[in-house]
Image: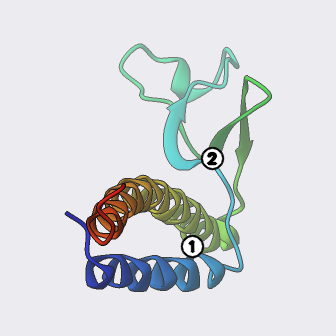
Amino acid sequence: MSSPEQIKKLEKKRSLLFRELLAYSLMIPGAFKEVYRKCGKENCWCCKPDAAGHLLKRITWSENGHSKSKAIPEKDIDWIIEVTRNYREFRKKRRELQRLDISFKQMFDAYEKEIIKKSRLLRDYL
């Protein structure tokens, strides 16, 4: 059973979600990672068996089905962490919006049936 009040409550949630989504001004897909990698130079300290390798700060993302990775300058690390977090939050809110849309459809379907049923009771030939 769906009431107009339930639908209005859902609409308030949806409106808030729209405002939150539209508030994002910067975002980049991908994940910031700190990884260790051996450079491959024969005389480098990282070639020793027990060495972890050089610390690299990178962003990794997928583009057209291919994995991409780029080094991040030290001065941009905080920025890249923020914009990748924004992207994840944006996508999460979009999924929530999709779930709300499904709920809207179900509520309006139920509401429509209720109204039709009430309307038919007003006439004995329906």
Instruction: Place residue 121 in its image quadrant.
Output: bottom left
Amino acid at pointer 1: Asp
Say left or right for 30 vs 85. Answer: right
Q: Residue 100 location, x and y as percent? A: 41, 62
Near-viewer residue (92 or 101): 101
- Location of the C terminus by quadrant is bottom left
Instruction: Place residue 41 in its image quadrant.
Output: top right
Could you tell me which secondary element the residue under label 1 belongs to?
helix
Say left or right for 55 vs 73. Answer: left
Query: Would you name the residue on which mark 2 appears?
Result: 58
Is residue 53 placed above or below 20 in the rendered structure?
above
Q: Mark 2 or mark 1, which has the lower sequence index? A: 2
Q: Residue 123 location, x and y as percent? A: 33, 67
Q: Residue 83 location, x and y as percent? A: 62, 68
Amino acid at pointer 2: Arg
Near-viewer residue (95 or 99): 99
The residue under the point 34% across, 61% down is: 107
Mark number displayed over residue 78? 1
Is residue 62 placed above or below 6 in the rendered structure?
above
Among all residues in the image, which is located at the extreme front?
Answer: 125
How would you rate the neighbour count of disc 2 (Cα within 10 Å): few for under 14, some for 14-19, many for 20 or more?
A: some
The residue under the point 31% across, 57% down is: 110
How would you rate the neighbour count of disc 1 (Cα within 10 Å): few for under 14, some for 14-19, many for 20 or more?
A: few
Measured Cα–Cα span from mark 2 to mark 1: 12 Å
Say left or right for 43 vs 123. Answer: right
- Location of the N terminus by quadrant is bottom left
The residue under the point 35% across, 56% down is: 125
